[in-house]
Amino acid sequence: MSDEEQQEYKRVYTGSEVNVQHLQNLLEEEGIATRVRNDFDSGLRAGFGGGLPGQVLLFARSKDYEKALRITNETFPDSD
């Protein structure tokens, strides 16, 4: 994710790939654009380590951050 994209998106969730995919579907059904970042997978593809296995980051557009965070907390109430 480029610096410009990072400024346009805010992290709303970090968790397993399955949870991130489920949450991504819910957010996109509400018209919220999302991006996924998997540092561990990216590091393996590039030939070096990075990130934690099984931890994927989900980002939502900054303008939709509050709504995305509300949906995230309703879907996974025990997440931070």
Image: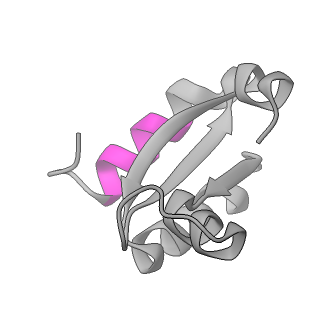
Q: Position of residue 49 (x, y in %)?
A: 48, 63
Q: Name the residue: 54% across, 57% down.
A: 39
Write down the region rendered in magenta: 68-75
- Whether residue 30 is visible here, answered yes or no, is no
Q: Position of residue 61 (x, y in %)?
A: 72, 33
Q: Quick one: quadrant of the C terminus?
A: top left
Q: Quadrant of residue 41?
A: bottom right
Q: Quadrant of residue 9?
A: top right
Q: Name the residue: 50% across, 73% down.
A: 22
Q: In the shown orientation, is residue 72 left or right of residue 78?
A: right
Q: In the shown orientation, is residue 29 left or right of residue 49?
A: right
Q: Position of residue 73 (x, y in %)?
A: 31, 45
* Labels in figure, total: 0
Q: Name the residue: 51% across, 25% down.
A: 66
Residue at the limit of the structure toward the front, as seen here: 47
56 and 19: which one is in front? 56
Q: In the shown orientation, is residue 1 left or right of residue 10?
A: right
- Whether residue 8 is visible here, answered yes or no, is yes
